[in-house]
Image (spheres, rainbow, N blue to C red):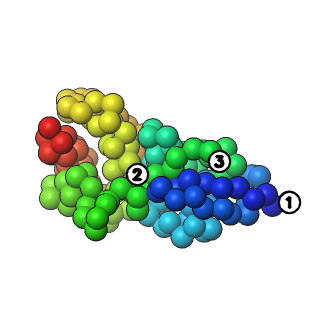
Amino acid sequence: MKRSITLNVNGAARTVEVEPRALLVYVLRDELDLTGTHIGCDTSQCGACTVLIDGRAVKSCTVLAVQAEGTEITTIEGLSGNGGLHPLQQAFWDKHGLQCGFCTPGFIMTAVDLLSQNPEPSEVEIRHAIEGNLCRCTGYQNIVAAIQAAAGAKS
C-alpha cells in the first residue's frame, strides 16, 4: 500500500507516492529523477548515495523515504547555484579529484558536511571524514587535494 509523502528536496517541496519500505535513494532517483545520487552497493559501504539531510551527510540507502519527510534534503544537483559550480565541485574539477565520476557526488556531499563543521580541516581530518566513501579508480590523493583546495577557497 503506497503512501503520499512530501519531501523538501533542493529547496522545493515534492510530493510522491511511495511504499513505506522504499529507500530514499530509490525515491530520489526513480521518482524524482535526481540521478546524481548513485546506487553503489546497497549496503551502506560505498557512500555513492550520500546526500545531506538537514545539513548532515547521510547515506540515502540507509534511510526510508518516509523517515525523510519533514527534513531538508540536498542532493548533488542542489549544490550549485546561478548556473555555476559549488566550490567543492569546482575543486574536484580543478584538482582532478575524479576519474570515472561514479563516487564523486558522494565524496562531494560528505565534504560539504565536513567543511560546514570544520572549515579548515587537516589532511588527517579530511581522510577520516571520507573513510565511509569508496573510490575504485583513484588513490584518494586528488580527492583530498580537492577538499583542501575548496577549504582554502572558502577562507
In the displayed structure image, the side of residue 144 where residue 80 appears, left or right? right
Is any atom of residue 141 visible in this view?
Answer: no
- Residue at the spot x=38%, y=48% of the render? 109
Residue type for callout 3: Glu
Closest to the camera, between mark 1 and mark 3, is: 3
Q: Which residue is mark 1?
A: 1
Closest to the camera, between mark 3 and mark 2, is: 3
Q: Which element is circle 1 on?
A: loop
The Cα–Cα distance between marks 1 and 3, rounded to whole angstroms, is 17 Å
Can you give x and y, in whole percent of width and height, for residue 87 in the image?
Answer: 22, 52
**Quarter-of-image position of residue 27:** bottom right
Please identify the residue farthest to the right as the structure is shown.
1
Q: Which residue is mark 2?
A: 106
Residue type for callout 2: Gly
Q: Nearer the viewer, residue 87 or 94?
A: 87
Q: Nearer the viewer, residue 42 or 149?
A: 149
Q: Which mark is residue 69?
A: 3
User: Which quadrant of the figure contains the N terminus?
Assistant: bottom right
Is any atom of residue 105 visible in this view?
Answer: yes
Closest to the camera, between mark 2 and mark 1, is: 1
Answer with mark 1 or mark 3, whichever residue precedes in sequence.
Answer: 1
